[in-house]
Amino acid sequence: ASNETGQYIYLAAGSGSFSRIGDAGANATSSTLTGASAGTYRIYITAYNSAGESAGSNIASVTVVGSTPPAAPIAAFSVSATSGIAGSTTFTFTDQSTGSITSRTWNFGDGTSSTLANPTHTYASAGNYTIVLTVSGSGGQSQATRGVTVSAPAPVIPNVVAAFDFAPASPNVHDSVTFTDRSTGSPAAWSWSFGDGATSTAQNPVHAYAAPGIYIINVTIFNSVSSSAATRSITVNPAAAYRSLVSVSAQTSGVGGSAWRTELTVFNAGNEAATGQYLFLPGAGGSALSRPLYLGSKQSVTFGNALLDLFGMSSGAGAIAIEASGTTITPTLKLTSRTFTSGASGTYGQGVPNVGSANLQTTIFLTGLESDADYRTNLGLVNRSDSAASALLTLYNGSGAYVASTTVSVAADNFQQASLASFFPAVTGRSFSALSLRADVSVAGAVSVYASVVDNRTQDPIYVQASAQPSGSRSTIPAIGRAPGANGTFWRSDVRLFNPTSSILGLTLRYQGASMPVTVLPNQTAVLSDVVSQFGATSGSGSLDILWNGNAGPIVASRTYTAAPSGGTYGQSIDATQAFTSDSYVPGLRSDSSFRSNVGFVNGGDSTIGINATLLSTNGQTLASAFVQLGPHAQTQYSLASLFPTVNVVSLGTVTLQAHTDSGPLLFAYGSIIDNTSGDPVFFAGE
């Protein structure tokens, strides 16, 4: 219109109502509208001025279409190979994706990735891997996957280089020598030559030489690509000499008018004769005496009055050492000894065990000592070496308190014994019902320490041997009891446990399936009187296991005894043992008008074992045999008459028990000889 001020624009979406959306201005012939969404619209205009607004124009229809979005890229790729070798094959991945791509990510399936267009990758380990390519663009993203198989590389077989060592470095004849392969290069086969005609194809063979000499050992090793040889020499020494010690023997008078003497039995358990010497080690710096020894295989000899019979001594006291050698092997001699005195009726005595070189440690302990109105203690030391030695002795009371200490010097190949008060004047006039001792010795393999605890009324002694603190987790007292015996006697057992450490020792005692905890403080001696009754039993007998956690256990002493009619007691000490074996021998048993003998067996294992028991005469002949079956951790005891009913036990004399099990090192055998008149027993541990 010629007089218009402007033009209003009205818009309606679809069939909806109109709305004024703008002003095109006066005299405009066109106008632009933006921002409309896709759809159908109706439009008309009006003119206006100060006088008002004209009628609407014709209605025009318009369709607005949306823009087309971009398409997402399509992922695709190829790989140079579908399989390869770990560590060597390089896979090349080529991107074959289409579309507009702004970014890409490769995931190789082993935790690694790449954003390159065409990456390469080497897998470190064998396996099946899935590769994922993800491509992205303005239209979205897509993925493509492919798999590859990666195999382990074939092993590289190196050349072998032979090497070996052996132990012991300087063995004796018949010692087991272990040869250990130290070769490199993964050998697969071995060929050994030991220099004495023997061979082996084992990797780590064991061999024993039958004769002394220098031997050349050769080993040749092989694998699929190479071979190599190594040579060494070994010096094999003659069989080592047998050395043992009976720490005390006597031909002397004692307290209360007693007269003491020693009975010694030696048995040759080996398969060849043994030759050597008996040595008497005197006290007071005297010179050792020597007498020859010869003993055939499986033969035994008994000296009823050892110092007089062997050395012609009508009086004296000292130790007896035994040295022997064999033709090709170290002799296996077994000893028992009994030092005793005659009472008003019969004899009373103590068994003195055999002490080997391995038992002569630098720190050893004793328990079961007593010094009061009822008992006295004698203390002895023997130096088995060729040079002087000293021992620091420290005494503790039952509660673990320090009592006294002293340093004792012992001349080479000498013996000394005295009352406890002579070594420790501090005990004089005081009463100690429980004492324990520590001995620190200046020289290894030299000194034996022992005690003899004597009943002041009966003069019956028990012998206690010093020993190192036991390792492992268990010691066993072969026999304890609470039971009636012959001639109206009643027997019971006391046990003493000494803790030689600075820590509290927690123990478990096991008897016939029942258990009892015991705690022993540092340096304390626990006294378990009538120990069977402490398990709640009124009677019974069996072995006692002493168990502990840790590396070392207590020092143990036990005494099984009965009351004497005129006061006091008599009995026997029974040492704890860890020496379970397949073969055990008990020489020195007596069965005649003066003595009877019992024998016992302990099974140290968790399963039933069978035991072949054989009774041997002094010349090694088999007198009788028996078979015993024994349950796990069980103990049994027989008289010779009940175990061997086919022999006349009254006329046997001195015999040896030989016990064997095929079940491995689970057996401990022992014997006890009893004076038929006094009823006094002496315990012999099997060896």
Image (cartoon, helix red, strand yellow):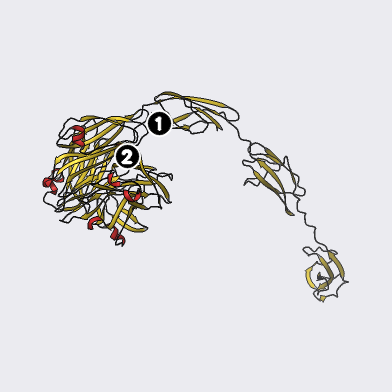
Q: Quadrant of the N terminus?
A: bottom right
Q: Based on the displayed image, in which of its 4 quarters is residue 5 positioned?
A: bottom right
> Is 400 located above or below residue 3 in the figure?
above
Q: Based on the displayed image, in which of its 4 quarters is residue 154 positioned?
A: top right
Judge whether residue 295 can be spotted in this image: yes
Q: Amino acid at mark 1?
A: His
Residue 139: image x %, image y %? 75, 54
Decide: few, some or many residues near mark 2? Use Cα within 10 Å; few <14, some 14-19, many ≥20. some
Q: Based on the displayed image, in which of its 4 quarters is residue 468 positioned?
A: top left
SS of the residue at dot 1?
loop
Q: Amino acid at mark 2?
A: Ser
Residue 518: image x %, image y %? 30, 56
Residue 685: image x %, image y %? 30, 45
Decide: few, some or many residues near mark 1? Use Cα within 10 Å; few <14, some 14-19, many ≥20. many
SS of the residue at dot 2?
loop
Residue picked out by circle 2: 617
Give the left or right position of residue 107, taking residue 679 as reference: right
Residue picked out by circle 1: 174
